[in-house]
Every structure is written in C-alpha cells, then in structure tokens.
Amino acid sequence: DALKVVSNEAKKLGAKVVSGPSWTMEKLLLDGAGEATGIVSEVGKESVADGLVMCIGVWSDSLLDTKSQLQARCWILAHT
C-alpha cells in the first residue's frame, strides 16, 4: 500500500502521522495571519504542527475554502 510506505518514511524523518476514524478532520486551525497551524478532528481532538500535509482527496473542496475551484474526477483505465 503506497500510502503506508509514504507514511512510514515520513515517520522515519520525524513526522507525526495522525489517521483513523478519530482523526477525521472537522476544520483547520488558523493563526492570526490565516496560516494553517493544525486541525481539529470530528471528535474534538487537536493536532498542531509547524507544517501540515493533508491527504483528503475528493473531500478537499468540502473541507477547505477553495471557492469551488476544485472538482473531483475519476477515470478508469482497463487493459484486456
């Protein structure tokens, strides 16, 4: 699983990885300048960091203020 490999490599480099049902993102934490500093999960957990990498895929537009500039797309490629 590619995501597990990337996650493990990030941990080796010192990253804190939060995932799973209790870490489903509800909102971003922003500082006074509007910069993201962390997240709040749906169950109220907070995680603050110097930098964030969010793997939120098709939910990007519903979780971030993108002003509907993003559209989820999916293409299937099959070889027979």
Image (tube, rainbow, N blue to C red):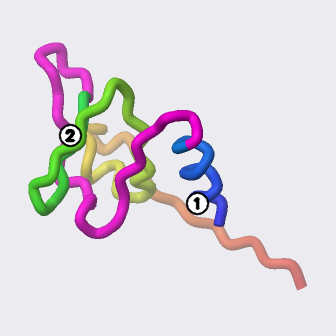
The part of the image, by quadrant, that contains residue 72 is: bottom left
> What range of the chain is rendered magenta?
12-36
Camera-nearest residue between 48 and 24:
48
Check disc 1 and report the residue beneath it. 4
The part of the image, by quadrant, that contains residue 79 is: bottom right
Residue at 30 percent of width and 38 percent of height: 66
What x and y, as percent, mark residue 18? 35, 52
Could you tell whether 6 is left or right of 25 in the image? right
**Neighbour tally class for label 2: few under 14, some 14-19, many 20 plus, Cα within 10 Å:** some
Residue at 62 percent of width and 45 percent of height: 9
Mark 2 to mark 1: distance in Å?
24 Å
Camera-nearest residue between 55 and 50:
50
Could you tell whether 42 is left or right of 13 in the image? left
Camera-nearest residue between 12 and 79:
12
Task: Tell me whether the residue at label 2 lies in contact with that at label 1, contact meaning CB atoms closer than 8 angstroms.
Answer: no
Check disc 2 and report the residue beneath it. 28
What x and y, as percent, mark residue 17? 41, 48
Residue at 58 percent of width and 58 percent of height: 3
Q: Quadrant of the C terminus?
A: bottom right
Camera-nearest residue between 63 and 71:
63
Q: If you read the primary sequence from the N terminus, does the residue marked by circle 2 or circle 1 appear first?
A: 1
Could you tell whether 51 is left or right of 48 in the image? right
Image depth: mark 2 or mark 1 in front = 1
Question: Which amino acid type is marked by label 2?
Answer: Leu
Residue 19 colored in magenta in the image:
yes
Q: Quadrant of the N terminus?
A: bottom right
Q: Is residue 21 above or below residue 70?
A: below
Dot 1: element: helix
Q: Is residue 51 above or below residue 72?
A: above
What x and y, as percent, mark residue 50? 33, 24
**Neighbour tally class for label 1: few under 14, some 14-19, many 20 plus, Cα within 10 Å:** few
Dot 2: element: strand
